[in-house]
Amino acid sequence: MTDVATSPPLYADDQALGRKTRIESPARQVVRRFARHKLAMTGLIVLVFIILACLLAPLIASHDPDTVDLLARNQGPSREHPFGTDRTGRDTFARVLYAGRVSLAVGLGAVAISVAVGMLLGSIAGFFGGRIDNIIMRFTDVMMTFPPVVIILTVAAIAGPGVRNTMLIIGLLNWPVPCRLVRAKFLTVREMEYVSAARSLGVPTKRIIGRHALPNVVDVIIVYATLGMANAILLEAGMSFLGVGVQPPTPSWGNMLNVARNISVLEGDPWQWMPAGVAIVLTVLAVNLIGDGLRDALDPRMKI
């Protein structure tokens, strides 16, 4: 008789078989698909590098961004000043790093505001429908008919410049897009069987929206947030360039570009504005690549 305790296993390698037959979670599938997107990974590496450089600015930059040195004004790149100095002798390299903190914070904060407002109004309009939907969507349509740049500049001129005002203006005037995206998703989700079952069981509406409906719009919001952050950074740069955004002496990539309005600086001292312009281009390009990668990774129909 064969001893049961010493009998060979049914499979030669049960652990290996378990790994082969393990079902991959949706989150892991998204991460794996995103990791296979070469352009998106390149954008992520560039963005992480820029963020770390800005966060570690006190350790990387050897000069204070606001220290004025009239004896070193308008100097070109050198060992002491890698990106040269501006017209008051401030180190351009240090100012680019510290300006990145402000521009990235404005972009992130503006997107957070627009997403919060858009998700709130879009979920209410899409879930309840009817008259509430008509009121919210007609107001959204009216907001989308105005030229966004003109409205932003007008409101900024009235409210006044500054980091907080710039963040609030960009965020509060860019909510219609996420609102329409969330509403479109909710119109589909509210007809799903599990939502109908939750209603029939008497589950409170707030719980249905928060626990069952909102998780189904996360993919849309993530993609919008990445692309919207790039747009917010560009809007901040434009506002600051025109003098209605972040104001000196607080550095931002936009107000550093403002010196290029002087033709002599534009042609003769490119080190005063070109580093900020390159930083904007690299950051926006990286964020857009990440957004494209997330869009493809979250769509199971796309082949990566």
Image: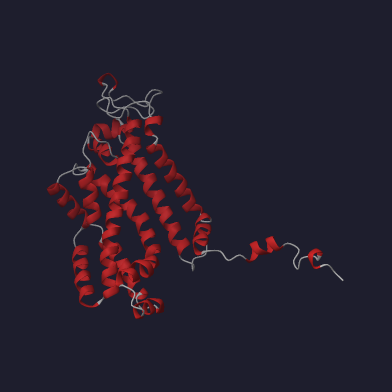
Q: Which of 56 and 145 is in front in this view?
A: 56
Seen at 21% across and 51% down, the residue is: 169
The percent coordinates of residue 98 (x first, y second) are 32, 35
Residue 170, above or below 296? above
The residue sitting at the bottom extreme is: 200
Seen at 34% across and 66% down, the residue is: 210
The residue sitting at the right extreme is: 1
On screen, residue 225 versus residue 17, left or right, reads left
Q: In which quarter of the image is residue 208?
A: bottom left
Residue 66, above or below 166? above
Q: Quadrant of residue 175?
A: bottom left
User: How many numbered dots are placed on residues in this image?
Assistant: 0
Residue 84, above or below 21? above
The percent coordinates of residue 183 (x first, y second) are 30, 70
Seen at 28% across and 46% down, the residue is: 106
The percent coordinates of residue 70 (x first, y second) are 25, 21
On screen, residue 159 versus residue 49, left or right, reads left
Residue 78, above or below 26? above
On screen, residue 244 versus residue 206, left or right, reads left
On screen, residue 92 versus residue 168, left or right, reads right
Q: How is the image coloured?
A: secondary structure
Instruction: Name the quadrant of the N terminus.
Output: bottom right
The residue sitting at the top extreme is: 71
Q: Which of 91 and 124 is in front in this view?
A: 124
The percent coordinates of residue 302 (x first, y second) are 49, 66
